[in-house]
Amino acid sequence: MFMWADTAWMWVAMLIFWSFVAVLAFYAVRAWARPASARPGTGAARLLDERYARGEISVEEYRERRHTLEQTAARERER
C-alpha cells in the first residue's frame, strides 16, 4: 500500500483537496446568485431607463424601445 497513508502528508493532501472543492463551490454559487443588474443583457434596459429619466426620449419612444428590448430578450431565452 501507500507508505505515507497514515502520516501528516495524508492530512495535508486532504486539506488541500477539500479547500479546492470549497473554493470551486464558492465561485460557482457566487456566479449563479449574482444580482440581475450584474447579469449580461440588462445594461440596455438600464441605459434606456436613465435616458427616459433625464428627459432625453419621449414616453412613446421609451415604450417602443422597451417593448423591443423585451421581445429580443424573450427570443434569446427561447434559444
Image (tube, rainbow, N blue to C red):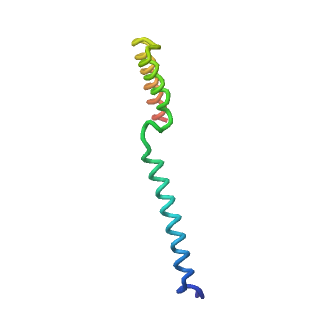
Q: Is residue 47 above or below residue 7?
A: above
The total number of labels drawn is 0
Q: Residue at x 45, y 22 (%)?
A: 50
| Quarter assignment of residue 64 | top left
Tell me what residue is drawn at x 45 percent, y 26 percent: 45
| Residue 79 position in % (x across, y down) | 49, 35
- Above or below, 63 relative to 9: above
Residue 10 x %, y %: 54, 80
Residue at the (47%, 14%) spot, across then down: 56
In which quadrant of the rendered image does the N terminus lie? bottom right
Residue positioned most to the front: 54
- In the image, is residue 63 above or below residue 27? above
Between 30 and 75, the residue placed more toward the observer is 30
Q: Position of residue 2 (x, y in %)?
A: 59, 86
Q: Is residue 44 above or below residue 34?
A: above
Indicate left or right for 8 with 70 as reference: right
Q: Position of residue 9 (x, y in %)?
A: 57, 80
Residue visible at 40% across and 17% down? Answer: 63
